[in-house]
Image (cartoon, grey):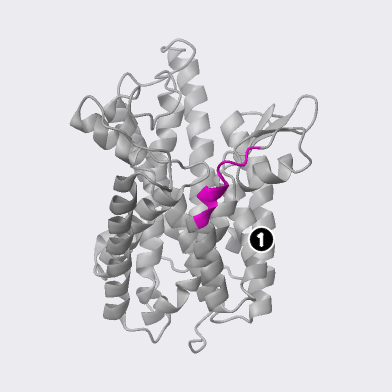
Amino acid sequence: MASAAPSIPLSNLLTPLATTPLRARLLAIDALRGLVMLFMLVDHVRETFFLHVQVADPMDPVNTPPELFFTRISSMVCAPVFVFLTGLSAWLYGQSHSRAEVSRFLFKRGVFLVVLELTVVNFAWNGTLVPTTLWLQVIWAIGWSLLCLAALIHLPRYALAASGLVIVAGHNLLDGIVLTAQSPFYELWSILHQRSFLQITEHTRARTTYPVLPWIGLIALGYCAGPWFARDADPERRTRRLAKWGCGLLAGFVLIRGLNIYGDKPWALQDSGVQTLMSFLSLTKYPPSLMFLMLTMGIGLLLLAGLQRLEGRPLLKVLALYGGAPMFFYVVHLLVLKALYVIAVQVWGLNQGKYFGFDNLSGIWVCSALLCLALYAPTRRFAQLKQHRRDIAWLKYF
C-alpha cells in the first residue's frame, strides 16, 4: 500500500481549480470521466429528440442507418469507463481511510445510488412520480456494484483481480440460462444477468435494463488497477502500462471477434463494407458482453494514457470540470432534457407523429454542444461547493 494521501471524496477525486501535485496527478481521471459523460449526453439527446426514427435496436447493422449507428456507438465507452473509474476511485479513497471506512462508504453510496435510480432518475426519464415502468439502468448497476465491492475489497488483491477477470471473461457462458417468471430464481437472475421485466405490483413493473453481474466484475478490476495511480508510482511507467493494456485489449478484441467463436453474437458479411463493419461492431451492452468490454475498455485505457500526457493543458481542466461532479451533471442533464422536451412540445407541437424531434442527426449534435456549454457554469459551481464545503456530508455522494 502507498503512503497515506490527503482525503479525496470518492465521487470527486479532483476539481479543476486544484493545484496540489497529488491532485494534478489525478486530473486525467476526472478528465476521462468528463469526456465519456459528454459522449453520454449526445446519446441521451438522441433518445429524447430522435425517437421518431424507430429502430428495434440502434446497433442493428441491417436495419439501422449508418449515421444513426455510429452516433449510438460513440457512447459505447461511457458506462464501462465510468464503472472502471468508480472502482479505481474507491482504491484511491482507501489511501487515506481504513478498509472498514472504505467499505462503509461504498455501502452507503451504493444504497444512495440505488434509491436515486428508483426515484429522481426514473422521474427524469418517465416524467411522472408514479411510473408504470421503473427503468433499472446504469445508476442502478453502479449502485449494486458498489454494494458488492464494499464486501469484495476485503479479499486479497490477487483474489479480487481473479474474481473480476472470471466474471468479465466468463459470464457469456451463462447466456444460455434463460429463466421464466415461474422460476423461483427469476427475479434474482433478472437482476444479475437476464434482461427482463419484473412485475412489482398490479400496475407497476421494472425493467432490468442493466443486469449487474458483468459490472461487478469490471468495478473489481478498476479497484485492482488503483496501485497504478499510487502517489509514488512512476508517471511514465503508468502511461506505458495503460497504453500497453489498451492496445492488448483492442488486439484481443479483433482476434476473438474475428474468429467469431465467443464473447458475443456472431457477426456476418453484409452487402457493403460499411454494413460489414457495423456488424463487426454490433456488440451486446445489456448485459455487456466480453467483446463489448474488451473494445470499450481498450479505448478507455488508451484515452486515459493520452490524457495523462496533457497535463497543464486547458482542455484537460475543462473535461475534468465535468468529471468533477459526475452525479450532479448526470441528474441535472436528465431533468433539463425532460424540461426541454416538454417546452418544445408546447411551443412546436408533435412535429414527428407521436413525438417532437429533430429532422436529422445534425440537430442532435448541435443540441448536445449547446447543452455542454449551458451546463458548464452550474457544474463548475457545484464542483467548487464540494471542494470548499466538506462539512456538508451529502455533497460527497454527488
Furthest residue toward bottom: 3
Residue 44, image x and y in percent?
44, 36
Q: How crowded is mark 1: few (under 14 residues within 10 Å), some or many (20 or more)?
A: many
In the rendered image of this protein, does residue 58 appear above or below residue 333?
A: above
Residue name at image x 50 percent, y 47 percent: 330
Residue name at image x 63 percent, y 41 percent: 120
In the rendered image of this protein, does residue 279 appear above or below residue 62?
A: below
* Residue 182 in the figure: left or right of residue 210: right
**Quadrant housing the C terminus:** bottom right
Residue 315, image x and y in percent?
27, 59
* Residue 24 in the figure: left or right of residue 135: left
Residue 90, image x and y in percent?
54, 69
Query: Along the line of sight, which residue is nearer the eye, 341 or 246?
Result: 246
Query: Along the line of sight, which residue is nearer the eye, 130 or 169?
Result: 169
- Residue 79: tell me if it is visible: yes
Q: Is mark 1 on a helix, strand or loop?
A: helix
Furthest residue toward top: 353
Furthest residue toward left: 273
The magenta region covers 170-178
Find out whether residue 119 is within the magenta segment: no
Residue 51, image x and y in percent?
44, 22
In the rendered image of this protein, does residue 291 appear above or below residue 325?
A: above
Determine which residue is flagged by label 1: 147
* Residue 117 in the figure: left or right of residue 215: right
Query: Along the line of sight, which residue is nearer the eye, 136 or 109?
Result: 136
The type of residue carrying mark 1 is Leu
Query: Along the line of sight, which residue is nearer the eye, 213 or 3?
Result: 213
- Residue 8: tell me if it is visible: no
